[in-house]
Image (cartoon, rainbow, N blue to C red):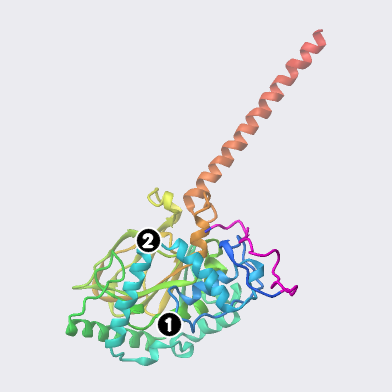
Amino acid sequence: MSLDGAVERRKETQAGTGNGNGVVTASVPSYVTHRLRLNPNTDHKPDSYEDLQLEFSPLLFSSLERYLPPTLLNVARESKVQYMREILLRYSPEGERTRVQKHREYRQKIISNYQPLHRELYTMHADNFFVPSFREAVRENTEESFRSIMTEPSPGVFAFEMLQPHFCGLLLSEVENFEKWVHETKFRIMRPNTMNKHGAVLDDFGLETMLDKLMEDFVRPLSKAFFPEVGGSTLDTHHGFVVEYGMDRDVDLGFHVDDSEVTLNVCLGKQFSGGELFFRGIRCEKHVNTETQSEEIFDYSHVPGRAILHRGRHRHGARATTSGHRINLLLWCRSSVFRELRKYQKDFSGWCGECLREKKERQRQSVAATKMELLKREGEAPKEAAKEAAS
């Protein structure tokens, strides 16, 4: 989508916006090319689209609204929906829209037949889900309050206590109940991703709304503070799932990056040994396979109820779970705005370790070349003075 801020109006059949009787009528302008602004209107409070049946996430519309042309910010919600929808349709390939529609039908089939075990999980109950320290930090909503409950054991990796044991137990029980239903009905389900052969997509059996609230009200404030350069303040969609490791489950997970801007990873339990995460530096797509620097090496050991938050482009993997059974909740949080803006960028030195190293090397070479030029000129100056004296 174009992001130069320009708005092209269609030619009106009459000059101006009159109705032919000399009366000017208020109307929403129509556009040949629907465009967004490069910079958001941060003071604008977007509408909620939760009550509408839309092809795209309601959060996506709320996120994009701040990027609308100023003349559209305060028009009727229906007009804003139409404008943003046409933009989204233009940049969403037909094949992708077909895939999304089929997945929506697949999800609806599950939700219509699966009977939840713990219905209290399907709506957000922060007091019952989160430990008090986490709730209070998010309520204060400052970087200082967030850091007061966190450690940053490696640059860009934040660890903190998050989930109450009772919630972890309920969610584990719900996942087991869903898997039992899948086995009994022989329903073929989609696994979380191409890497994990076990686990379940939580959104597919009804937890999407609760996880939307988790992202919007709890993950996004943290991401806005710590990951603004990768769209942390504009997270608008998610992919929520659990992964399972142990005997007769996945054993380990290879080196990879996530399809997310920000990833929340929380261990739910149970008893296990091994399964450490290993991190190896943040990379853009161009540099994803470059070497790891010694300062980028970090290993993390899971603790039930404890979360880690990191950029999706932070390369990582999971070592083998050597005994027991480990289950983790993953929330891949995405920003459609960041993904669009990224198409027009070439330098990612604000977050890619290799881009930053290349930038520093260019700066070093530039400084060295400037010094050489100055030394050369200083060396030539006495020669010029000697020539003038001799003449």
Q: Is residue 50 left or right of residue 239?
A: right
Q: In the image, residue 46 lies at what x, y percent?
A: 59, 76
Foreground pick, 347 / 102: 102
How much space separates mark 2 and mark 1, taking CA atoms? Answer: 28 Å
Q: Is residue 168 left or right of residue 15?
A: left
Q: Quadrant of the C terminus?
A: top right
Residue displayed at 38% across by 82% down: 207
**Dot 1 alpha-carbon crowd within 10 angstroms: few under 14, some 14 to 19, many 20 or more:** some
Disc 1 marks a residue whose amino acid type is: Thr
Q: Nearer the N terminus, badge 2 or badge 1?
A: 1
Q: Is residue 80 visible?
A: yes
The label number, if any, that marks residue 209 in the structure image:
1
**Residue 36, image quadrant:** bottom right
The label number, if any, that marks residue 316 in the structure image:
2
Q: In the image, residue 193 lies at what x, y percent?
A: 31, 67
Magenta segment boundaries in residue numbering? 2-24
Q: Is residue 329 magenta?
A: no
Disc 2 marks a residue whose amino acid type is: His
Residues at circles 2 and 1 in contact by the CB criterion of under 8 Å = no
- Above or below: residue 126 compared with residue 65: below
Q: Is residue 155 visible?
A: no
Q: In the image, residue 79 lies at what x, y percent?
A: 57, 75
Magenta segment main secondary structure:
loop
Foreground pick, 3 / 222: 3
